[in-house]
Structure formats: structure tokens, C-alpha cells
Image (spheres, grey):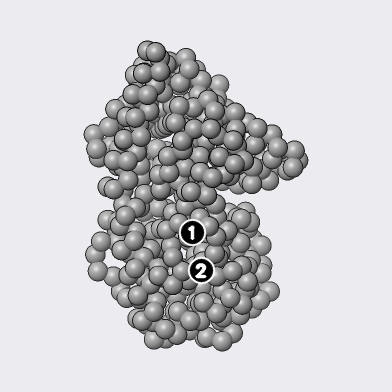
Amino acid sequence: MRIGMFCNAYRPVINGVVRSIALFRQGLQQAGHFVSIFAPDSKGYRDEEPFVFRYPALPLPTGVEYTFPVVVAPQITWLVPKLKLDIIHTHHPFIVGSEALNFSRTEGIPIVFTFHTIYHEYTQYFGFDVELFKTITRRIVADYAQKVHCIIAPSLRIRDELYHTYKVDRPVHVLRYPVDLSPFSGPRRPPLSDPERVQLLYLGRLVPEKNLHFLLRAFALAAAEEPRLHLRIVGEGSEREALQAEIGRMDLSARVELAGPVPFCDAPGELLRADVFLYPAQTESMSMAVLEAMAAGLPVVAVDCAALREYLDHRVEGVLVPEEEEAFAAALLELARMPELARRLGEAGRTRARSYSLSSLTPRLIAIYQETIEQYYRTRAA
């Protein structure tokens, strides 16, 4: 197949959606399919991958890592018909996603839409009146979902949101995010093997919805009781300066490190050097960071939410706690002081992560594409 993926963010942006797009592209190419990417430009970044086509883009006024695509791009308008695409896969319903829908109509190409997140919960990034923009966003997304030929959701929580909030009246395929198991295939140091130090890790964006100030407060409670605990926070985002200031105010500079961002290729090394992975966010989608931590054999301590329970069971692959600092701190202390429990949870997570391997999930995506193409042409012929 010849596949065109359209998205509002791609490399060098570091987040779970971009990671899933890049991995599925890799899996599809390994299976012999042609995959082109259409995404906004990123100033100063040079693509090393072939067939990545960029829209001109402007920085957002909020200073986040995303850019605002300018979809007046004659070169892409000329190019898309020449690629003879069999299917379009759009990952966002706005801007570049609207371009994808236009190409689907004008070129007669079936279109698949992955609904990655609850978009109206992220409107603060665009600097508009939040409540008004939430209402507008819901309407736009609902309209978009009715116009595509197939919808994919990465979690049951998002599938249910599509049915209940956006009133989607067609089946939604649930396709989890994939994980590349190859960096974690070899032997690794068992978690908590250093009797003098317990290394905790958060790996992800430093943004409000990740709940990192809660994490610092919970860590402070645990660190006061357990001197071996150290926390490494890896990532970048709008909360970095505020987090650095809070670390100073709490006198945690010797115990908490803000390490900055790392490229995707270095993330496995971060995971393999850690003892316990921490995830304080209330997420509605599948967390790539949690999944990769499980693949690395790390026990996970996370704030309990429905989306996480879809692939992580309490006291099987990790510990799920209410959003209470004392409960989160107690879970950290329990794993730090019970290495056998931590190792058992980590091994169970490693086993479960295999069911989300790229080699397992890519054939399912291919089957969705094939089914959508067949249904599209049956409908046109009727």
C-alpha cells in the first residue's frame, strides 16, 4: 500500500503521539509499504527520514514546542496526487487534518482518523477563551469524525468519549500504541540492586496536565522517610522553570534532578538505569512512557485512572493509587523497601508489554487499512 500520514506534530517534537506515528511508520515500512509523512515545519530541524514533507509553520504564542501549520503549500497540493496514495491516515482533526480530509475528497482516497486525545481538554495551549474554545472544539471534532471513513482510538476511554461526547454513530477500532521491544531485549540490571540508592524516574513532557507539582510533593514526603530515594525528571515543557523553583523552595536540589529532554533513541537507556517509574498524570489515552517503562521491566507507580487500568493492573504490573500525596508516597516507600515485590511487578510488566509489540500491532493496522479501502470502494460502486 501507499499510505500518507498527516499530523500537526512530528519529529523533533517529543511526545507519545509522535512516537506512535514514527513507530507505526517503521512497522509499515518493514512490512513493505510506502509511507509518507505530512507535518508542520520545525525551525532548525533537518529531516533524516525520506518522504517527510513539511508545511510552513509559525511558532505558537504560548511558547510551547508545537508550531502552527500554514496549509497554503502549493508544493504539497501538487505532490499529493503524484504519490498515488491508497489511503490517508490523519492523526489530528484540525489544520493539517483538514488538508487530509480535503485531499481525501478531491483525490478520491479513503481516510482513516486516529483520535489520539480529548482535544477540548487542551485548549489552553492556544491562548483563546478556554470555555468558548472548548465548545467550538467539540463541534469541530464531532463534525470531522462523521466525515472520515474509519476511526481508530488508542484506548477504550477515548472510544467511549467518541460515542458519548462526540456522538459518533459508527464502530471505532481500538488499536493500542505500539512499543519497540528491541532496546529492552537483552539482560538488564534488576531494579533496586543498589542497596545505597533507589532511582525513581519520570520521563515525559513538563506540562500542567502531567501533574508534576503533585509528584514533587509526594516525593518530598517519601524522601523525608527514605534517604536512598532520588528522582530524575527527564523531559521539557512549559513547567520547567516553575518546577525548578519549587525544587529549590522544597530544598530538594540534592535529591531531584531536572535532566532536560532526551531524543527518542536515548529514552530506553534512561529507563534501563532506573529502579521505579512514576506517572502522576490522569491520562485519557494510552501512555507510551508507561508502556515503555513496562517493556524495560520497571515497576510503575501511577495515579489511578481508567485508561491506565486497560493495560496495567494494580499490584500486578505496578501500583495504582488515588491522587493523594500520602498514598503516592506510601507506594514509593513500599517498593523501595520491598525489592522482591518491585522485581515481580517489573517482570510482569515486561511480559505484558510484549502484547503491544510493534510486530504484533502493525498487522492489525494493515488490516484496518485494507478493510477501510475495501468498504470505501464497495460504497462508491453501490
Helix, strand, or loop for circle 1? helix
- Please tell me how crowded label 2 is: few (under 14), some (14-19), or many (20+) other residues with Cα within 10 Å: many
Q: Kindly check if marks 2 and 1 are in contact, taking CB atoms under 8 A apart as contact.
A: yes
Quadrant of residue 205 within the rendered picture: bottom right
- Residue 6: x %, y % from top left: 46, 31
As drawn, is 221 to the left or to the right of 344? right
Q: Residue at x 55, y 55 (%)?
A: 283
Q: Name the residue nearer the viewer: 370 or 105.
A: 370
As drawn, is 343 to the left or to the right of 68? left
Q: Residue at x 64, y 36 (%)?
A: 138
Q: Residue at x 38, y 63 (%)?
A: 294
Q: Is residue 269 above or below residue 13?
A: below
The residue tagged 2 is 320
Q: Residue at x 56, y 73 (%)?
A: 328
- Residue 203: x %, y % from top left: 48, 61
Q: Is residue 130 above or below residue 355?
A: above
Q: Name the residue nearer the viewer: 59 or 293.
A: 293
Quadrant of residue 49 within the rendered picture: top left
Helix, strand, or loop for circle 2? strand
As drawn, is 251 to the left or to the right of 334? right
Q: Amino acid at mark 2?
A: Leu
Label disc, if present, on residue 308 of the rendered structure: 1
Q: Is residue 145 above or below residue 308?
A: above
Mark sitting earlier along the chain (2/1): 1
Q: Amino acid at mark 1?
A: Leu
